[in-house]
Image (tube, rainbow, N blue to C red):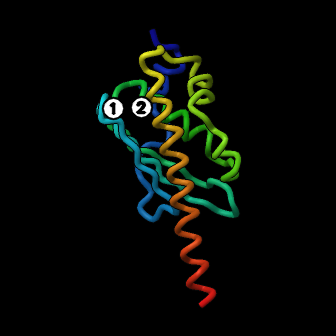
Amino acid sequence: MYSDKVMDHFRNPRNTGEIPDADGVGTVGNPTCGDLMTIYIKVKENRIEDIKFKTFGCGAAIATSSMTTELAKGKTLEEAMNITRASVAESLGGLPKVKMHCSNLAADALHAAIEDYKEKNKKRGSKNEI
């Protein structure tokens, strides 16, 4: 059974959509269950200024995506990298064991977006040095 918080984030997801000029984008999927998540971030002065998500999946996948964006918004990149599958599930009041893989995807998509941002900045930095 899902907690009230999971149901709230499923019925009223926060930060949905995409950021066309995102600084970082992370997409992850699970071929077993068919869930697919993309997280978009805008970064200003090493903080996640804006964050959005698009998720194709079950209610738990949508809820964990929503909660992950809530947890990450306003955080430094380092703080956001510390958001884990366990912290997402805990923030939602728990998830059924069979749905725990969904929270793994949300945290992984966030981490992938941050890594994408860092990689893009590394490339920009090297161009500026030439």
Is label 2 in contact with label 1 (beta carbons under 8 Å)? yes
Residue 78 - label:
none
The residue indicated by pointer 2 is: 62
* Residue 86 image-quadrant placement: top right
Of 113 and 55, the residue lying toward us: 113
Outermost bottom residue: 130
Residue 87, image x, y percentages: 63, 29
* Residue 10 image-quadrant placement: top left
* Residue 31 image-quadrant placement: top left
Residue 55, image x, y percentages: 37, 39
The residue indicated by pointer 1 is: 57
Q: At 51% across and 59% down in the image, what residue appears?
A: 116
Q: At 61% across and 22% down in the image, what residue appears?
A: 90
Q: Circle 1 sits in a helix, a strand or a loop, which is it?
A: loop
Q: At 42% across and 31% down in the image, what residue appears?
A: 62
In the shown orientation, is residue 93 left or right of residue 97? right
Which of the two labelled residues, at mark 2 and mark 1, occupies the earlier sequence position? 1
Q: Looking at numbered disc 2 in the image, what kind of residue is underneath it?
A: Ile
- Crowd band around label 1 with a 10 angstrom C-alpha radius: few (<14), some (14–19), many (20+): some
Residue 1, image x, y percentages: 45, 8
Q: At 48% across and 48% down in the image, what residue appears?
A: 52
